[in-house]
Amino acid sequence: MSCYLIKVENGHKVARSITSEEEYKQLRGSNEQKANLRLARAGNDAAKRRLVQFNYSGHYPQGVVKGMKLPSGAFGFDMDEPEAFAKAAKLLLKEPDKYGLLMLERSARQGGHAVFEREKGKTVLENQVRIATMLKCEMDTSAHDINRVYFTTTSDDEDLLFLSPRLFKDEYDEAAVAAEGKVLEERERYGQEELPEGAHKANKHYEPWKEEFKKDSQGVFKGQEFKNSRISTSAASTSAAAASSASTASSAQDNYLGIPYGEIIKKWWQMYNDGQEPMRSNRNTLTFELAVNLRHICGFDRNLLAQIIPCYDGFPEQEKMACINSALNEKITQMPKRLKDVLSAIRQERMKQGNAGGGSAADNEALVNALDEANAKDDLFYYNALPKLPQGIRDSVSAVGPALALPVITAICPAIGMLATGVKVSVHGKMNSLNLISYIAGDFASGKGSIDPVIDAWTSEVKEMDKMYQQKEDEWRAKKRAAKNKKEQPEEPKLPVRCLTLNNTVANLAERLANTEGKHAFSFTPEADTVAQKWKSAMSDFSVMLRQAYDGTCYEREARSADAVNVHIDRLLWNVVMCGTPDALYRVVSNYTDGFQSRIIVAKTPDNTFTPLSDNMYVMNERQRDRIIQIAHLLPLLTGEVVLPKLEDKGREWLEQIRLETMKNDDKVKARQRFRICPTTMRMMTCIMLCKVLETLIQKHGFNGAEKQLKESPDLWKGMLVKTQTPTMLEAFNILADYQLDNALYFFRSRIEDAFSSKNYCSQSPYDRTHRGKNDSIFERLDVTFTFEQAEQQSVAVKGATATHETVRQMLKNWKRQGLISILPDKRYQKVTSII
C-alpha cells in the first residue's frame, strides 16, 4: 500500500518510505512525539505542527514531494468531530475488512484519521465519498489532495486504534502507477473533484449520503453538472467567508473582554519596566516576556500577537516574530501571575472610574464581572485537564469542589502514602516508599478549612487506634503520679501512635517516630503558624527531620542522660500536611538552599477576594466519607515492591521536556526544581493508581470481597497496578508535575534567585541577610554604578518622607557590609552582585 514519513529539509518537503510496522510505531512512540501531542491537545498549534507527519495517498519513488501526482494503493480520510469519529470508529473496528481499513487513529484534536485501500481507477475524492456514504458520516472535502499529510499521534492503544501490516506492503508496478496517475490527474482537472451545491470546499464538511448523486454507466460522477453547481456556490461561500473573517477581526483583534490590548501593554510596561518601552539592548527579551504572557489572552493566536505587539525601537519584523514564535512554543500553563496583576490593576482603575462617574457605569461593571469570571475559569485550568479520578480521590474532590481539586489532591496523597506504608515503587532504579510532604497555601477565608474533614476521613481508622493507645498512656500517667514516691515505678509503654501533633518538642516527636513499628507516621495541622511558633528556635531541626523523612533515611538522636530521649530509626517514615497563609509558608520554609523547599509540594487555593458571598455548595456527605473510608481501610493490606515502567518513562519524558525548555531560556531555578518534582509526582501517581486498583476490586467483588481477595492473594494488586498505567491515567502525571512546578516558581523563584546569587551564599559570608524589605526595591532601581545623591533620590521615591540623609548613609553602609556594593575611587558606588 503506502506510508511515507514527510519532513522538510533545506526548505523542501521530502518523503521516506516506511516499510515496517515496527519502524512506524517507533516514530509515533518517541518521548518528543508524546510531549508535543500533550501540548497540542492543550491547544498549542506550534506543538501540533511539530508532530510526526505521514502521507498515505501518494507514491514518491524519488523521495521528492513537490510536483508528484502518483497515486498509492491507499488514501487518507479525515474526521474532525469527536462524536462523529467515535461513531465511525465503532463501525470500522467491527468490520475492518468490509471497508478495507488499514489504519485508524485518534487525532491531536480528538477527532480521527483513517487510511483505507483505494479502489483503482478512482480518485482520492471518489474513494472518500464512497467511504463516507458507507459510514454515513461527514467528510472533509479539503483533504483529497494526493500530497495531503496527516499530523499523527502516538503508538499508545488509546491513540492508535487499528493498524494492518498490509499498509506497509510494497506492490508497485511503476509503469502502471504512472499511467493511472495521468488518467486520475486528467479526471481531477476536468471536474471529478467537484461536489454538489452545499458541498463546496469552503464549507469543508460534506454529507454525501444525503445527496442525489448522478453517475454514468461506469459509476463515475458527471463532472460538468458539479461544475455548474460549483460556480453558483463559489462566489457566495467566498463572500460569506470574507465577511465572517472581517467580522471576527473587528470584534476580537483589538481588545480582551473590552480592554484594548494597547491599554494592557501600556500598563504592563508601567508595572514592569518603569513605564519605559523596550530599547535595542533589551527588546528581544522583553518582547518575548510580553508575548509569553499576552498569548493567554490572545487565544494563542500568532497573527493576533503579531498585530498587537509593536516593533520596539526599530525592531525588524522578522526578529519580533521569532520572539513571538518562541513564546508560543512555551508550555501552556495557567495565566501567569504578572499578567493577572496587570488585569487586576486595570480592573481597579475601571472600578474607580465607575465610582467617580467616569465612563459608562454599566460597561465598567460588565468589565469587572468579565475579568472575575475569566479568573475563576483560569483557576480551573488544571482541574479541567484531570482524567477521571478513582474512588476516594474522586469523593475528596467532590467534597471540596472543583476550585480546590488540586489542593485537596495535594493534601490527601501524603495520607494515602501513610496508609499504604508497605508499598514501595521504583523511581529511577531505586525503591521509594510513598513519602510526601505538602503545604496548602492560601489567604484567610480562602477555603482551606474544607480540607480538614477530608483528611479526617482518610485517617479516621488510624486515629481510632491511636485513641486506644493514648488511653493506655493516660492510665500509665495516672499510675506514675500515684507511685511518685514509691520505689517501684510503672514501666512506660512504647505505644505505636501514628497521627502525631506538630505542637510538640523535638524530643517528644522523635520518640513518637521511633515507636511506630516501622510504619508511616502522619501529621496534619490546619494552621502552619503552629509550626512556625512552636519550632521557632528549632526550625533547623524540623527542616532536617522532614528532609530525612522525605528521603526515608535513618534518623539518630543521642543524649548523655539516661532519662533523655535517645532515638535510632533505620528509616524515618513520616508524612506531613500543613495548611496556612503564604506568610506562614515563608516562616516555615526560610532557607532556600538546603533542599527543604524542593521536597515540599505546595498547592495554592484560588483567589476568592472578589467572589460574591454564597451558600457553600460543597460539604462532605456521609456517602463520600464512607467511600473514602473503604479505600483507606484496604490500603494497609498492600505490601511489597513494584516496578512501573510506563510511569518511569512518563517521568523521564517530563524531565527531558523541562530540561530542553529551561536550557533554551537558561532558567536554572526551574531546571533544578524538576529533579525533586519528578519523583514526588511519581509517588503521588502511585497513590492515585493504588486507589484505582482498589476501586476496581470493590466494583468487581464488593467491599468485603475486595478485602478477602487482597488477603488471599497478597501480590494481586501488583499486576493490577501495572495494568493501571493507561495513557489516560498517566496524563495526570504532567498535570500534577506542572502544577507543582508552577507553584514552586510562584512562591519561591525570586527568593531562590536571591539566595543563590547573593554574595553571602557564594562566599559563605558570616552575615546572614534573610530579611528583604524596601531597601531591596531601592537597590533594584539603581544603575550598576551610582552616586549617593541617586541613592537618596530613589530612597525618597520608595520610602517617602521617612528617607533621611542619615538613613540613606546607613543603608549604603549595610549594603557594603553585606558585600552588595563597593566604593569606587571617585566616591561613587558599584553593585557587586550585578557583575558576579
Image (tube, rainbow, N blue to C red):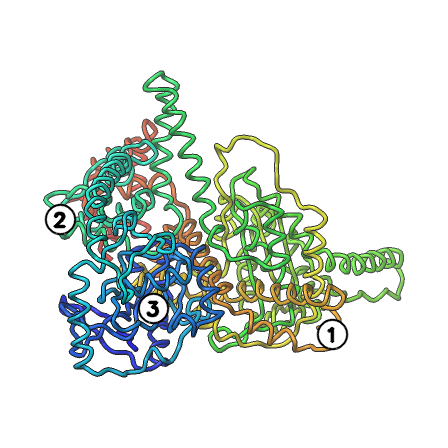
Camera-nearest residue between 134 and 299: 134
For mark 3, give the secondary structure: helix
Identify the residue at horizontal 15%, vertical 65% (top origin): 186
Q: Position of residue 30 (x, y in %)?
A: 36, 72
Observer-nearest of 131 and 356: 131
- Which residue corresponds to mark 2? 317
Q: Amino acid at mark 2?
A: Glu
User: Can residue 762 be seen at all in this image of the molecule?
Assistant: no
Real-space CA distance between mark 3 and mark 1, rounded to the nearest whole angstrom: 42 Å
User: Which residue in the structure is indicated by mark 3?
Assistant: 32
Residue 344: x and y, percent? 38, 34
Image point (56%, 52%), residue name = 537
Inter-mark Cα distance, 2 to 3: 30 Å
Q: Label for residue 711? A: 1
Q: Residue 561 is drawn in which quadrant?
A: bottom right
Q: Earlier in the sequence, mark 2 or mark 3?
A: 3
Of callouts 1 and 2, the N-terminal one: 2
Q: Residues within 10 Å of mark 2 (few under 14, many from 20)?
A: few
Q: Give how far across and how far down residue 486 sits, in percent.
A: 89, 62
Q: Nearer the viewer, residue 444 or 423?
A: 423
